[in-house]
Image (cartoon, rainbow, N blue to C red):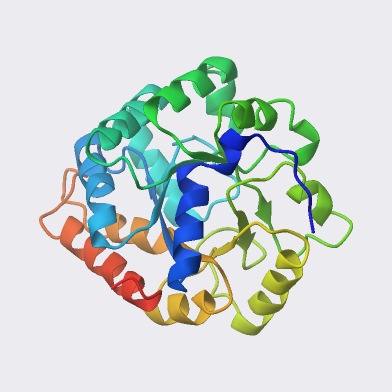
Amino acid sequence: MNQQNKSNKIDDTRIVRLFSDLKKEGRPALVTFITAGDPDYETSRDILFGLPNAGADIIELGMPFSDPMADGPAIQASSQRALKAGQTMKKTLQMVREFREIDSKTPIILMGYYNPIYVYPGDRFLEDAEAAGVDGLIVVDLPPEADEELCLPAIAKGINFIRLAAPTTDEKRLPAVLKNSSGFVYFVSITGITGTAAPDAKSVGAHVSRIKAATDLPVAVGFGVKTPVQARELGQMADGIVVGSALVNIIATNLDPSGGANDSMKEALFSLVGGLAEGVGNA
């Protein structure tokens, strides 16, 4: 097993407690992704506030960025909509602060790229993120070799730093990915960008087993999960299911002529989340 030297602070976060509770319940977590500020601040905030009641266990909040290279067209477009509407990192952290005023339990993970954090700059970002109530970070373009840049300072703040593992993460690379990871491991179920293919359950199961043999951390599966049936099938072999592009696509297809939300957007999005929640047994 991967032995990690983490502080008590990082061992007792909302993320860690949630996975512990769900393990006792015998079901996986439903992790939902939306981009902060998409299609505008008010609508995005309303969606964020409503996700837990719809059935989300953990929320990944995308940090809009102009060049999201690992994301598919849907999430790239969501970043562009958010930036066009004036979303900034300060506004994203403000959204988390407002969420914490009504919800002290649901874990919030900020997901995205290092550039917006670097220019914030990084040390002030971590202070503000901790104060806002952020529980975890997924920074897809910071490799383990750069852990001193953000990962280790985040851990010192009690913020879980969550790593991505892919089908191409072999036995030689996996220990480096796991070394300072905490909270859970995010297994990318397909090679390529988000939202462009469906995961193969048999292959996913083999990779999840391989990762779990190397760490005590929970493993959540994402990239390509779109339906309650997929959530149910993959949830039988993983500790969490991550759904992003399917939710972002609902936002994209429910825009009014001005680019804002139409009357059906929130209802359609929360309905899908509810179905996915049923798929993982959170009904």
Quadrant (top left/top right/bottom left/bottom right) for the C terminus: bottom left
Q: Position of residue 191 (x, y in %)?
A: 67, 64
Q: Position of residue 47 (x, y in %)?
A: 24, 49
The correct choice, above or below, for 133 with respect to 164 in the image is above
Q: Residue at x 37, y 77 (%)?
A: 279
Q: Is residue 201 left or right of residue 51?
A: right
The correct choice, above or below, for 12 with respect to 131 in the image is below
Q: Quadrant of residue 94?
A: top left
Q: Position of residue 154 (x, y in %)?
A: 60, 29
Q: Residue at x 38, y 57 (%)?
A: 57
Q: Residue 113 or 101: which is nearer the viewer?
A: 101
Q: Is residue 249 left or right of residue 125?
A: left
Q: Residue at x 86, y 62 (%)?
A: 171
Number of numbered tags placed on the structure image: 0
Quadrant (top left/top right/bottom left/bottom right) for the N terminus: bottom right
Q: Residue at x 44, y 34 (%)?
A: 134
Q: Is residue 152 visible to the viewer in this orientation of the structure? A: yes
Q: Is residue 167 visible to the viewer in this orientation of the structure? A: no
Residue furthest to the left: 263
Residue furthest to the right: 172
Q: Position of residue 218 (x, y in %)?
A: 60, 60
Q: Quadrant of residue 215?
A: bottom right
